[in-house]
Amino acid sequence: MAQAKFRYDQGRLGEAKSEALRAADVFEKLGAAEDLEECRDLLRGIERRMTELVNPDDESSDDDGDTGDRGPNTHWVHGENIESTVNM
């Protein structure tokens, strides 16, 4: 799960999704309900950000000005607040 969060914070969403899916599978097998729910929350966040990057003008996206749990390398692109994928 830590790897998934790390990749998410870096803006490496595909890798974050893969790591989170693996973690969710392990948590489910172990019966770790709280960890599984946290992992599912992260997966929802990843999916939301991936959708925002593909459809930046989508009116259904969360555009309340809040950057939420986005990382430190946030930039504005097409009116959307997104993270840079450049490793710093």
Image: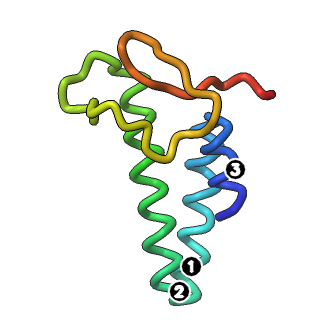
Q: Which mark is residue 6?
A: 3
- Hey, which quadrant is residue 9 in on the image? top right
Q: Which mark is residue 27?
A: 1
Q: Which mark is residue 32?
A: 2
Q: Earlier in the sequence, mark 1 or mark 2?
A: 1
Q: Position of residue 58 (x, y in %)?
A: 24, 22
Classify 11 as above or below 18.
above
Q: Residue furthest top?
A: 78
Q: Residue at x 61, y 67 (%)?
A: 23
Q: Position of residue 61 (x, y in %)?
A: 26, 32
The type of residue carrying mark 2 is Ala
Give the left or right position of residue 78, taking residue 4 as reference: left
Classify 55 as above or below 62.
above
Quadrant for the N terminus, please: bottom right
Classify 87 as above or below 49.
above
How many C-alpha atoms fall within 10 Å of the one at disc 2: few (<14), some, or many (≥20)? few
The type of residue carrying mark 3 is Phe
How many C-alpha atoms fall within 10 Å of the one at disc 1: few (<14), some, or many (≥20)? some
